[in-house]
Image: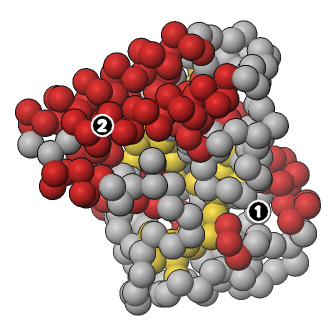
């Protein structure tokens, strides 16, 4: 993918977003489902101009962006600029969408019936911001200050989010990847532990590298800590059949497993790396 496409979120003119007669929050999800149903087949999304940008996030999946819709200047609930896919059972599944609009400050776009807290903002390219603190769990604003930004709001219309329809992270994703049904509730710590078992070690290792800035030898040592933790969680969890409920008594075990893994990672880190990693809301 060209750098121009990666930077599409911040290049070009800032467009006016007109107010329109749009559905209430309770209806937006059904309108979005009807408008994106054809994208259950990812080849249809590719045909319509969506392209993958950034990594596969443990709690968000892959972001597939349509630059034309992003720069169109109109927020249409039936035509979200971002589709979110996750590979479940070896097949890419559409799990959610995101609405995005260019803004000049932290003001949230008024054109959709979304709660103001659902919006967060990006100021860099998607690649540059793929592993910043906010995508590791900080809610709301990813960037402070003036200048061109992209306001983003997620809507989990194809995979229920235990935390709520418009929450940024959906920790039911690791459950689905492991073959478990969406639980009624799930903490972020339990979700992160499940993500390790679901194969997200590389993501967390990259997060540690980007935020902690360890040297190559320390990177290897810290990744080994994550791999050991992933193996331990996998022994607890196993795999489901797609409709298998996640045992409720497993959740506190998962929470402890993640906290133990993070503590072990910090203990294995050098002082400077540990200080930088301490800023992550993953502990």
Left or right for 133, reference 66: left
Q: Can you tell which quarter of the image residue 178 is in? A: top right
Q: Where does label 1 land, which residue?
A: 77
Residue ID at (52%, 77%): 102
Are the residues flagged by discs 2 and 1 in contact, CB closer than 8 Å? no
Residue 92 appears in the picture as rendered? no
Of discs 2 and 1, which sits in the foreground?
A: 2
Left or right for 53, reference 251: left
Residue 238 lies, with reference to residue 262, above or below; the image says: above
Left or right for 119, reference 115: left
Q: Where does label 2 land, which residue?
A: 265
Q: Earlier in the sequence, mark 2 or mark 1?
A: 1
The location of residue 185, given as percent across then percent down, is: 76, 40
Q: Can you tell which quarter of the image residue 250 is in? A: top right
Residue ID at (20%, 42%): 269
Q: CA distance from mark 2 to mark 1?
A: 42 Å
Residue ID at (35%, 68%): 124
The location of residue 76, given as percent across then percent down, is: 73, 66
The location of residue 123, given as percent across then percent down, is: 39, 73
Front in this rendered view, residue 186 or 35: 186
Front in this rendered view, residue 220 or 66: 220
Q: Secondary structure at mark 2?
A: helix
Front in this rendered view, residue 99 or 239: 239
Residue density around tag 2, few if under 14, some if 14–19, many if 20 or more, within 10 Å: many
Residue ID at (84%, 47%): 34
Residue 59 appears in the picture as rendered? yes
Front in this rendered view, residue 148 or 143: 143
Q: Secondary structure at mark 1?
A: loop
């Amino acid at each position: 993918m060209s750098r121009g496409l990666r930077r599409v979120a911040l290049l070009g003119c800032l467009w006016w977003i007109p107010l329109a007669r749009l559905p209430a929050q309770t209806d937006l999800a059904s309108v979005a489902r009807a408008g994106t149903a054809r994208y259950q087949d990812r080849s249809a999304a590719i045909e319509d101009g969506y392209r993958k940008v950034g990594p596969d996030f443990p709690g968000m999946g892959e972001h597939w962006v349509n630059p034309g819709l992003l720069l169109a200047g109109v927020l249409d609930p039936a035509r979200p600029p971002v589709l979110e896919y996750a590979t479940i059972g070896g097949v890419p599944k559409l799990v959610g969408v995101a609405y995005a609009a260019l803004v000049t400050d932290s003001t949230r776009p008024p054109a959709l019936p979304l709660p103001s807290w659902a919006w967060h903002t990006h100021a860099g390219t998607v690649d540059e911001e793929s592993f910043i603190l906010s995508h590791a769990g900080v809610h709301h604003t990813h960037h402070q200050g003036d200048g061109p930004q992209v306001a983003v709001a997620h809507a989990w219309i194809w995979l229920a989010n235990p935390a709520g329809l418009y929450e940024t992270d959906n920790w039911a994703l690791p459950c689905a990847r492991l073959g478990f049904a969406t639980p009624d509730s799930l903490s972020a710590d339990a979700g992160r532990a499940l993500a390790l078992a679901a194969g997200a070690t590389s993501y967390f290792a990259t997060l540690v590298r980007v935020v902690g800035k360890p040297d190559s030898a320390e990177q290897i040592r810290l990744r080994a800590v994550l791999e050991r933790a992933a193996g331990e969680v996998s022994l607890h969890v196993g795999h489901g059949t797609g409709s298998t409920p996640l045992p409720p008594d497993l959740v506190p075990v998962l929470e402890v497993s993640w906290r133990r893994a993070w503590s072990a990672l910090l203990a294995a880190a050098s002082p400077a790396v540990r200080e930088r990693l301490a800023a992550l809301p993953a502990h």
